[in-house]
Amino acid sequence: MTVLVTGGAGYIGAHTTRALVAGGHEVVVLDSLELGHREMVGEVPLVVGDIADEGLVAAVVREHGVDSCIHFAAYKAAGESMEQPGRYFANNVAGTNALLGALQRGGVDAVVFSSSCAVYGTPEHLPVNEDTPIHPESPYGESKLLVERMLAWYDTCLDVRSMRLRYFNAAGASADGTIGEDWTMTLNLVPLAMKALLGARPPLAVFGTDYPTRDGTAIRDYIHVDDLADAHVRALEHLRRGGPSAILNLGTGTGSTVREVLAAAERAAGRPVPSEDVGRRLGDPAAIWADASRAAELLGWRATRDLDEIVSSAWAWHSRHEHHGSY
């Protein structure tokens, strides 16, 4: 049987597609290419279209023998979602509702969902586990939470099981340097640091140097994209074995400050990242990192790559693809 990967021409989707193929799984990708790149998919069958097109989804399920889905396709910029909430709810929530309906009618009963730590908002206690209170602070985070709730009801009402994966800060590139993140479509720290190193942007703004952290800058849990891809494959295999639905955090269990990330970038590139200290950015928590022990217990999964491996792989990718971001 075949797994449908929505958004499989995007950053995390493409790495997961590659991991699925390496694991012997049959894969078909559905991507609008609004944010994805055809070249990221390689030789895997690619259907260009929208997840909200129920007729198209039904045809893909039927023609490719799809029995399961890993769902990445979504808009993902929290700041943009504050300016365009309707666009995020239309695509991320209504689009997913259409997708799930078409999948369920086609007999698909296993879904792995790309959720986010954005559902937690600013946590009161660290590390964050799956029982931490949820307080999304953007329409983006709210859209992820709404889809999680939709999936819970699909399980209760229609026996469509799901793994809802709340991951933290994805970063890095494939070990062979052939696919990576598109820096033209991201506000993430690691690719922006690479962009600054390569002179493709002004000095990197370090938002806030007076946080109650070890060096005054914000702490995040950075996880290598290949570790995330491995977790998605394991989550799919869990469902295919008949395993129950679950919500899981995916992170390293440790946090790195902004200055530590920039130091890792300097080690990778051999020169400092041009940067400037500025004030805090509204809505940014001082620190957040994951307790991913539940994923270890249920899937036997742990992140294996450290910050230096994450940043050095990103540097290897971006330094060879500096003129076009990603493909």
Image: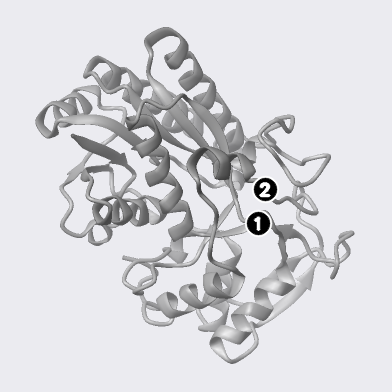
Q: Mark 1 points at which residue?
A: 221
- In this picture, residue 261 sits left or right of residue 140: right
Q: In which quarter of the image is the C terminus?
A: bottom left
Q: Where is residue 28 shown, x and y percent of the image?
A: 20, 42
Eyeballing the image, is 240 above or below 83? above
Res. 80 image quadrant: top right
Q: Is mark 1 on a helix, strand or loop?
A: loop
Q: In which quarter of the image is residue 210?
A: bottom right
User: Which residue sits at x=46%, y=21%?
Assistant: 151
Question: In the image, what residue occupies the spot 63% across and 44% down?
Answer: 293
Q: Which of 155 and 51 is in front in this view?
A: 155
For this view, does 209 lie left or right of residue 177?
Answer: right
- Res. 213 image quadrant: bottom right
Residue 105 at x, y percent in the picture: 25, 15
125 horizontally vs 261: left or right: right
- The amino acid sitting under disc 2 is Ala
Quarter holding the N terminus is: top left
Using the rendered image of the protein, determine whether residue 83 is visible from the camera's viewpoint. Answer: no
- Name the secondary structure under disc 2: loop
Residue 290, numbered label? 2
Identify the residue at horizontal 41%, vertical 52% (top origin): 229
Residue lying furthest bottom = 270
Q: Which of 286 and 292 is in front in this view?
A: 292
- Spatial CA distance of label 1 from label 2 is 7 Å
Instruction: Say few, some or many: other residues with alpha carbon within 10 Å of mark 2 (under 14 / 14 to 19 / 20 or more).
Output: many
Identify the residue at image location x=50%, y=18%: 152
Give the mark, 1 or 2, whose residue is nearer the N terminus.
1
- For residue 64, above or below residue 42: above
